Image (cartoon, grey):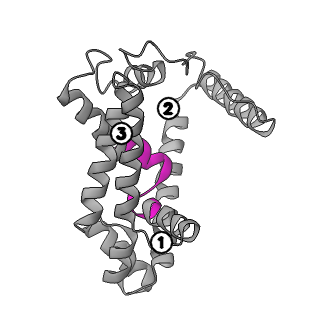
Amino acid sequence: MSKREKVLEVMAKHPSWGVLLVAKKAKCSPSYAHLVRKQVKEAEYNAAKAELEAESTPEERFWESAADSTAKAMSVLGIELEAESTAAATWVSVPATGISAEVETSYKNNKDLPPTPVATRSHILDTAKSYITRDRQADHGDAEDNFSRIAGYWSLHTGTTLTATDVAVMMALLKVARIKQNPQHVDNWVDGAGYFACGGEIANQ
C-alpha cells in the first residue's frame, strides 16, 4: 500500500480526525496528510460542481458564469459585493433584537432552520452546529488545522506558546466582549457556542 493510499484509508475510517491524527496513524508528515486531504476535497467539490452543471439549463449556466465573472472583477478592483447572487441577498443588519439579514438569507437558501424565532437555546445551538459542521468547514477547512495555524502566528507575535485550544478560547472571549457591547445580537452567541464546541473537540482528541 502506498503512502497516499494509507492516508486515504485512515481518512475514510476516521472522517472526523484532524490532520495531525491522520498523519500519526498513517505514519507520514502532517503536511503530506494535509495535501492529500486538500486534493480529496477539491476532487469532491469538482465532482459536485460537475453534477450541478449537468443538471442546470444553458440559461442557468450563463447567469452563473456571468455572476462569477462579475464577482472576480469586483474583487480585483477591491469592491465588496452587497449580494451573493441575483436573489439580492443583503449584508445590512436588522435591528439588534433580531438577526442579520445575511443569516436570515442563509436560512432561507439552505432551508435548514427557520429565521424566527432564533433567540432560543435550541436554535442558537442548532445554528452553531450547522456552521461548524457544514458551512464554515466547507469554506475554511478543518477547524483543528486552522486553529493550529493561527496559534503558530499568534505565538510568534506574542512571544508566548499558544495552542489550538487557546485559539478557540480566545476567539470565544472575543465574542464575549462583543456580547458585553450588544447582548441582543444573536450572532455573537452563536459564534461563541461554535468556538467552544470546536475547542472542546480539539482538546479531547
Q: Position of residue 47 (x, y in %)?
A: 49, 50
Q: Which image quadrant is residue 124 in?
A: top left
Residues packed near mark 3 inside 10 Å, few (<14), some (14 to 19) or many (20 plus): some
| Residue 91 belongs to the span the image colors magenta | no
Is 119 left or right of 157, judged from the image as shown? left
- Eyeballing the image, is 31 above or below 15? below
Span shown in magenta: 134-146
Q: Which image quadrant is residue 62 in?
A: top right
- Are the residues at dot 2 and dot 3 in contact (C-beta closer than 8 Å)? no
Count every numbered label the image shows and give the total: 3
Report the mark closest to the observer, 2 or 3.
3
Q: Position of residue 164 (x, y in %)?
A: 39, 64
- Eyeballing the image, is 144 above or below 113? below
- Are the residues at dot 1 and dot 3 in contact (C-beta closer than 8 Å)? no
The residues tagged by marks 2 and 3 sit, at their Cα atoms, a distance apart of: 44 Å
Ranked by sequence position, the earlier of labels 2 and 3 is 2
Q: What kind of residue is marked 1?
A: Thr
